[in-house]
Amino acid sequence: ELVAIALENARAYRAVEELGEEKERFSVRVAHNLRAPLAAMVSMLDVLGEGYTGGMNPTQLQYLQRIRRRATSLSELVSELMVLATSHGIRGERFNIPVDLSGLVAHVGRTFQDRATERDQNFSVDAPEGLPPVSGDPGMLERMLENLVSNAIKYTPKGGTVRLGLSYGPDGRLLITISDSGIGIPKAVQQKLFTEFFRAENAKAMETAGTGLGLVIVRDIVEKHGGTIRVESEEGRGTTFFVTFSPALSGP
């Protein structure tokens, strides 16, 4: 009887796994099929806005710009949903690649330097060489860093400070810190920070565009790599994210 129960539980577990895999495949297909027409829509709206098809009066331009903002937000949402569904479907074999976090942090810093300069922000990157690699997927880890740095720059007013650093943590793990002097996160909502589609009210007031999925993707990537993520923040005084990963095991 115990063997029969164990076999039945195993079959039920596999059935649940298959349903989850099918859900992920369906999400990727839907997002993929929506992304191309949305991109085409934004492109055509740009053509209209630039006046290539004839002039428009101020009221028409205003409505056109509002439509474009909505279409762009929807396109970003579809892209984030596709990334999240793809991330959920990735299995462990993708995480055996040695990744040089120092090089990755430096690369992401160069990517965002111009954006920070445009906002007159003091943007600094500290990525010392010689630190051990981690085992993981380079593309996913880069996406995780990009999401965190992009948020830090987006929600920090002009003239503020954004810092990206890599070091050893007190427990011997590799520690990535992303800190800013931006608007901060209200204490009352910090527990919802990694919830799908959640955005704090002060974030929505400062930047209307946003999917509420960026930090969900970040958490998913960190957890898939066996890492941890936590946040310290105070409204009006900035935010710091702490991400830790274990160094890759050396030897055979």
Image (cartoon, rainbow, N blue to C red):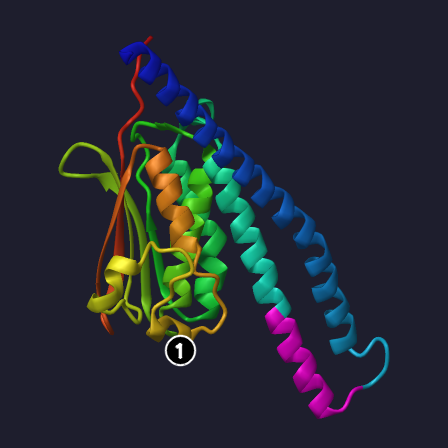
Q: Position of residue 4 (x, y in %)?
A: 34, 13
Instruction: Residue type at mark 1: give it.
Output: Ala
Say whether residue 97 is visible. no
- The N terminus: image quadrant: top left
Q: Give the left or right position of residue 157, taking residue 115 as reference.
A: left
Residue placed at 65% from the left, 75% from the top? Answer: 67
Residue placed at 64% from the left, 67% from the top? Answer: 71
Q: Which residues are the magenta region? A: 56-70
Q: Position of residue 142 (x, y in %)?
A: 45, 42
Number of labelled discs? 1
Q: Secondary structure at mark 1?
A: helix
Q: Which residue has dot 1 on it?
A: 205
Q: Position of residue 252 (x, y in %)?
A: 33, 8
Residue placed at 22% from the left, 70% from the top? Answer: 237
In the image, residue 106 above or below residue 53: above
Q: Nearer the viewer, residue 189 or 149?
A: 189
